[in-house]
Structures are given as structure tokens and as C-alpha cells.
Amino acid sequence: MQNIFESNIYFKSMVSCLVHEMAHIYGAPDHYHEWTNEEKTICRGGERCKTCHPDTGRSESCLMNVGWIDNIEVENKNTLFCEECIEDMKEYVAKCYKNK
């Protein structure tokens, strides 16, 4: 059986996906475009979707919009998330500490 860690390819492709999913723990919402019904009337990104609502201000290059970045190790870590997602996470964490 081949060990998936012999090559870093699998690991590298999963890192950004894990970062994306972990950001949900801190309140970052998805804002990528994906239809959730056959009629194509309901988008998963909702009012945050850059495709459905270009004026949202959220960046198309934000990790919460693209879902994963193949070469995340060379990306500027300060620009992985858009300012709006960073604010969403700050507000969420502040609420968590406020409620303790």
C-alpha cells in the first residue's frame, strides 16, 4: 500500500482546505458561488457571494471564496482572508469571550 505522505502533494493540496474549514470555527462564512437547488435560484454564498452580488466588497481571492489554494505555502498569509472575513472572525471570537 502506498503511503500518502511519501509525496507532499496530498498534504499541500489539503492544507488550504483545512485552513478554510477551520476558519468556519472562528465565524468566517463561505462566500463562494454554488447553486444549492436544481432551479439555480439559491446560492450557497447568499448575500456574500461575489458572483451574485459583485458589490459585496469581499475579495474573490479570499480563501473563503475560493475554498482552497494549491500553492498556499507561497501565498502572503496576510491576504489569505478578505477584510470582511477577518472582521467576521474578530466579531465571532469577541462574542465568544463576552459570553463567558
Image (cartoon, helix red, strand yellow):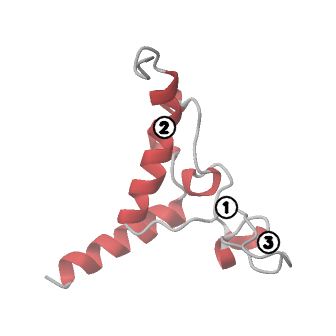
**Mark 1 highlights which residue?**
32
Give the residue type at disc 3.
Cys
Alpha carbons under labels 1 and 3: distance apart: 10 Å
Q: Is residue 46 left or right of residue 100?
A: right
Report the Cα–Cα distance between label 3 and label 2. Answer: 27 Å
Query: Label 3: which residue?
Result: 52
Return the x and y of residue 98 as percentages of the image width and height. Answer: 20, 82
Q: Earlier in the sequence, mark 1 or mark 3?
A: 1
Instruction: Determine the residue positioned at 19% across, 76% down.
Output: 97
- Identified at 48% across, 52% down, the residue is 20
Q: Which residue is mark 2?
A: 14
Question: In the displayed image of the protein, which residue is found farthest to the top?
Answer: 6
For residue 94, say whether it is visible: yes
Whether label 3 touches label 2, CB < 8 Å: no
Give the image location of residue 75, x and y in percent: 53, 33
Please provide percent x and percent y for residue 17. Answer: 50, 45
Q: Amino acid at mark 1?
A: Tyr
Q: Dot 2: what SS?
A: helix
Cα distance between the residues tagged 1 and 2: 18 Å
Q: Residue at x 49, y 41 (%)?
A: 16
Which image quarter: residue 24? Answer: bottom left
